[in-house]
Amino acid sequence: MRGGVTVRYGVLVLLAAMVLVPFLSIVLAALHPSGAQLDGLSLPDRWSWENFALAWERGNFTSLMRSSILIAVCVVPLAVAMATLAGYGLAILKVWGHRAVSFGFVLGLTLPIEVIVVALYFNLREVGLTNSYVGIILAEAALFMPFGVYWMQTHFSNVPEELVEAARIDGARDLVVLLRVLLPISWPAITTLSVLYFMWSWNQFMLVLVMMQDPDRRTAPGGLGLFVGQYTTDIPLLAAACLIVVVPIVAVYLVFQRSFVNGITQGAIKG
């Protein structure tokens, strides 16, 4: 028994090291003087914290961060609300054709953005939604729907039917059942989905690159791509720019870590 526990902890430590060591190397690289030649995980002779300010200024991250935050803040509640309503309709209300609709959303999980981005660009251009935040927000919300609907449908399918039936016997209508009965016990699943949506929206690169022609209105990952092309040889500056883009995702995960883990493990502990 002790040997098995030791092996499990050893595997966890190894996996943690595989994640943290590369991240540590980026942090150390960002703290070297700008233009320095790096050698593995070497400590800098002088801690150059000014690299972050320099990368922020040269990469125009003020505008890029503003765009990323605006898009993510709009996409997350919109996509979560639609996924929750759709999952409720498919799992609890069992609307007409719910099996076929559910299968369609599952098929949507296999559709990569690279396949549809060109056609999506021309469709949005016809209605004047290219080079605009509205077009990107609607496109991202639609692209995230297959997973969100599948996630919320699976969650609602695990809710005891007696709970819904008791609410209906008390005279609660469908919307009241959702808002007052199901949502209060669904926050772990909703929080997890919101964190995932935020991460995906923040990291979205190709869609924004194609839909947004104005460089000042692109998101942080898109601006980072241009930054890499301009400062290919300046590794410390590149590392600082990468950390600037990554920090918001890490911060959101740390804030919602408990709810995120509860939502991920919820399906495993349900009978």
Image (cartoon, rainbow, N blue to C red):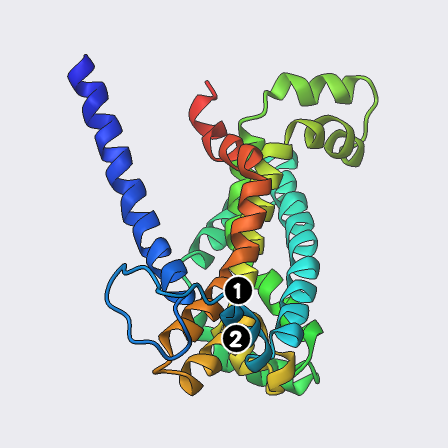
Q: Residue furthest top?
A: 1
Disc 2 element = helix
| Amino acid under disc 2 | Ala
| Amino acid under disc 1 | Ile
Q: Is residue 75 visible?
A: yes
Nearest the eye: 234 or 48: 48
Nearest the eye: 189 or 260: 260
* Residue 267 spot, x, y in % from top left: 47, 29
Q: Residue furthest right?
A: 171
Q: Is residue 239 above or below residue 215?
A: above
* Residue 254 spot, x, y in % from top left: 54, 42
Mark number, residue 215: none
Horizontally, is 34 left or right of 211 in the view?
Answer: left
- Mark 2 neighbour class, 10 Å CA radius: few under 14, some 14 to 19, many 20 or more: many
Nearest the eye: 183 or 199: 199
Disc 1 element = helix
Horizontally, is 35 left or right of 50 in the view?
Answer: left
Q: Residue furthest left?
A: 3
Mark number, residue 55: 2
Mark positioned earlier in the residue sequence (2 or 1): 2
Q: Residue at x 53, y 27 (%)?
A: 158
Nearest the eye: 89 or 1: 1
Q: Is residue 73 above or below residue 266?
A: below
For the residues labelled 2 and 1, say whether their Cβ atoms are less than 8 Å apart.
yes
Q: Residue at x 67, y 51 (%)?
A: 82
